[in-house]
Amino acid sequence: MNDCAPSESELLQKMVLGDRSAYAAIYQRYHAGIYHYILRFVKLPDLAEDLVHDVFLKIWEVRERIDPSGAFGGYLYRIARNHVYKTIQRIAADRVLRARVLRHLGEEPPLEWIGQNKEYERLFGQALSLLPQQRRNVFRLCREEGKTYEETAAILGISRNAVKKHMILSMRSIHDFMLRNGDVTLVLLLLAMVA
């Protein structure tokens, strides 16, 4: 019998050479898994589907760099994860896009937002606890107590530039932690609360 389906390696070899039917077969093989993986992060089916298409478009664009004998599944999921993070960052930075997503999320019942707010507070507390002690002190003085950089520097006996650097690094750490461990609704809830 010659009805054997081609192996993933064979499909990848053909795709690398520009075979669109092999690309379509790879798409069919991974679409559902990538969709559900992305949906875990973004919680919005339409956005998840758009991101899946973006990921597979990227795969087509970089196909010549894919190693058919390598671990393609891991590579594909890594691209998906990175694309989700970049998209969340883009949404966070773009007021119009953020407002559109928040409008969509506004259709959810208020209790859902309350639950997400509690989840956000839990994750935020975790992110804060992972900061080095000095960075956590700087963050608490500046953000929670409303002290200026100069006041914080005087209290902690460090320079204003050191306070600024600690704030930049703490915000980056907290942001990265939230992106890795939360989902888009939590990140957008945070942005809605501070906007």
Image (cartoon, rainbow, N blue to C red):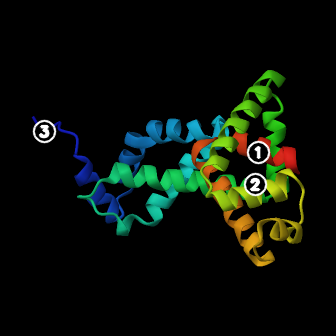
Q: Residues within 10 Å of mark 3 (few under 14, many from 20)?
A: few
As measured in the structure, the alpha-carbon distance from the residue carrying label 2 to the one carrying label 3 is: 52 Å
SS class, disc 1: helix
SS class, disc 2: helix
Q: Earlier in the sequence, mark 2 or mark 3?
A: 3
Amino acid type, residue under disc 3 in the picture = Asn
Question: Residue 55, how many percent across, how many down?
Answer: 52, 53
Q: Earlier in the sequence, mark 2 or mark 1?
A: 2
Q: Nearer the viewer, residue 173 or 162?
A: 162
Amino acid type, residue under disc 1 in the picture = Leu
As measured in the structure, the alpha-carbon distance from the residue carrying label 2 to the one carrying label 1 is: 7 Å
Q: Picture quarter containing residue 192? A: top right
Dots 2, 1 in contact, CB < 8 A: yes
Q: Residues within 10 Å of mark 1 (few under 14, many from 20)?
A: many
Q: Which residue is mark 1?
A: 188
Question: Residue 187, how many percent across, how many down?
Answer: 72, 45
Question: Residue 105, how many percent across, how many down?
Answer: 78, 35
Q: Picture quarter containing residue 176? A: bottom right
Q: Which residue is mark 2?
A: 92
Q: Nearer the viewer, residue 93 or 70?
A: 93
- In this view, the residue farthest toward the left is 1
Q: Earlier in the sequence, mark 3 or mark 1?
A: 3
Q: Which residue is mark 3?
A: 2
Whether 156 is drawn above or below 140: the answer is below
Amino acid type, residue under disc 2 in the picture = Ala
